[in-house]
Image (cartoon, rainbow, N blue to C red):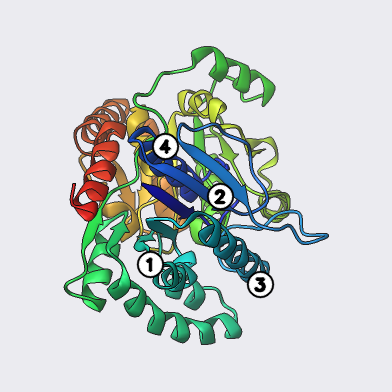
């Protein structure tokens, strides 16, 4: 059984969708499927059993593409289509597994070459277009909303990562065959890295006080600007607290650093930049509090499951992106406002017994419902059911 897996992202990168892609293709390769993964030109090389990696053409002068919808992404998707067509013509795949917007041309390829289509709805492209702020993209959102139902109807299987996406797909096509497979943590179990945490604390000159940690991209919807303002409020009450932000591109870090300087945060807020996956355990171990200040979106971020697995207390905004998985028994949920986020962080710091209880419940919940083993079982079962095995 041969699968063409279309992933319109740099691969591999330590961020949500590429991590999910790595997990899915890893499961399929281990299950005995022959997987050809087609992605953007950039990314770290990884070796996965049963998986070959192909990259689309690189345009001169284009070095990277950011998170979310953009003009360069449209160009890259156009180039990706031609590489995908060539791979289909040469290899005659049984299944085309298309992530996000690649499903729009993946559906056409599936019809042309007689393959089954798996539509992997990691997020809604129409929603991304409407939230982009660009008049051109908002116009294209209407076009996307017309293509989404047609693509779903053609798909032999639709994969979603959370309840809100499953509900949306059903609202468009009530009889769609849906498998809801939530993201999973980075590893089968969390292994604290005390030595790495001590090294990071020393390298970043964090002292001995509490550390608030955020991990992930720095796109506007993640609310990192909200976190910066909240840390300024926290520091008025607790001058020993510092914040480390892990992830992001240089331009995003430059913009947020300017905001931090305007709030006189100085060395209280540190941007660690992108870090390899092997270093994430050190930052999780370092954290006194883990935060997710997201301000938009309905799909649950992959990092939430890793946060939960660490056993550290979580402070997150009270939005569907979080409340589909988190509640007051395993996290402090706050309104997406600087004062509320700051108060949530301060509550965890001043109530260590509550912090410990929240961490224990979060770790138990992810082990029971969202483990890596459960993720693998769901992927294998969804494919077996689709193929009638």
Residue under the image location 27 percent in, 26 percent down: 353
Return the residue at label 1. 114
Q: Examine the image and state in which quarter residue 275 appears.
A: top right
Q: Nearer the viewer, mark 3 or mark 1?
A: 1
Q: How many marks?
A: 4
Answer few, some or many: residues within 10 Å of disc 1's Cα (few below 14, many 20 plus, some between 14 and 19). some
**Would you call the spot at circle 2 few (<14 residues within 10 Å), some (14-19), or many (20 or more)?**
many
The tag earlier along the polypeptide, 2 or 1, is: 1
> Which is more foreground, mark 2 or mark 1?
1
Element at badge 3? Answer: helix
The structure residue drawn at horizontal position 50% and vertical position 47%, both measured from the top left corner, is: 36
Looking at the image, tell me whether mark 4 or mark 1 is earlier in sequence order: 4
Lower sequence index among marks 3 and 4? 4
For residue 52, say whether it is visible.
Answer: yes
* Residue 185 x, y percent position in the rendering: 37, 35
| Spatial separation of the CA atoms under disc 4 and disc 1 | 25 Å
Local SS, label 2: loop
User: How far apart are labels 3 and 1 at the CA level?
Assistant: 31 Å
Left/right placement of residue 69 relative to residue 56 reads left
The residue singled out by tag 3 in the image is: 71
User: Mark 2 or mark 4, which is nearer the start of the sequence?
Assistant: 4
Disc 3 + disc 4, Cβ < 8 Å: no
Residue labelled with disc 4: 26
Left or right: where does residue 93 sit relative to residue 279? left
Which one is in front in this view, the residue at disc 3 or the one at disc 4?
4
Q: Position of residue 5 (x, y in %)?
A: 46, 53
Q: Which mark is residue 217?
A: 2
C-alpha distance separating marks 3 and 4: 30 Å
| Left or right of 74, for residue 99 | left
């Amino acid at each position: 059984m041969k699968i063409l897996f279309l992933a319109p992202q740099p691969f591999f990168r330590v961020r949500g969708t590429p991590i999910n892609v790595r997990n899915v293709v890893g499961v399929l390769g281990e299950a005995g499927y022959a997987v050809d993964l087609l992605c953007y030109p950039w990314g770290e090389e990884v070796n996965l059993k049963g998986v070959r990696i192909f990259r689309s053409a690189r345009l001169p002068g284009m070095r990277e593409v950011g998170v979310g919808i953009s003009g360069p992404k449209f160009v890259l998707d156009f180039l990706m289509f031609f590489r995908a067509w060539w791979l289909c013509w040469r290899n005659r795949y049984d299944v085309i597994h298309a992530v996000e917007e690649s499903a729009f041309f993946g559906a056409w390829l599936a019809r042309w070459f007689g393959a089954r289509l798996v539509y992997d709805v990691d997020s809604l492209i129409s929603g991304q277009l409407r939230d982009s702020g660009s008049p051109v993209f908002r116009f294209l959102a209407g076009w996307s909303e017309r293509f989404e139902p047609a693509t779903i109807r053609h798909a032999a299987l639709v994969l979603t990562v959370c309840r809100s996406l499953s509900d949306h797909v059903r609202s468009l096509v009530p009889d769609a065959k849906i498998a809801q497979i939530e993201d999973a943590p980075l590893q089968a179990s969390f292994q604290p890295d005390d030595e790495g945490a001590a090294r990071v604390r020393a390298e970043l000159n964090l002292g001995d006080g509490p550390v608030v940690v955020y991990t992930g991209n720095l796109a506007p919807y993640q609310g990192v600007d909200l976190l910066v303002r909240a840390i300024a409020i926290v520091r008025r009450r607790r001058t020993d607290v510092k914040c480390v932000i892990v992830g992001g591109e240089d331009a995003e870090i430059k913009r947020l650093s300017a905001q931090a300087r305007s709030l006189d945060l100085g060395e209280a807020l540190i941007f660690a930049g992108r870090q390899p996956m092997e270093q994430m355990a050190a930052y999780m171990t370092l954290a006194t509090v883990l935060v997710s200040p997201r301000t938009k979106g309905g799909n649950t971020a992959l990092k939430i499951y890793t946060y939960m697995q660490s056993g550290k207390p979580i402070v997150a905004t009270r939005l569907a992106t979080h409340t589909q998985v988190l509640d007051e028994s395993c996290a402090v949920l706050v309104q997406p406002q600087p004062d509320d986020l700051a108060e949530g962080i301060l509550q965890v710091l001043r109530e260590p017994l509550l912090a410990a209880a929240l961490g224990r419940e979060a770790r138990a919940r992810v082990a029971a419902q969202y483990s890596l083993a459960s993720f693998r079982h769901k992927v294998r079962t969804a494919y077996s059911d689709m193929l009638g095995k």
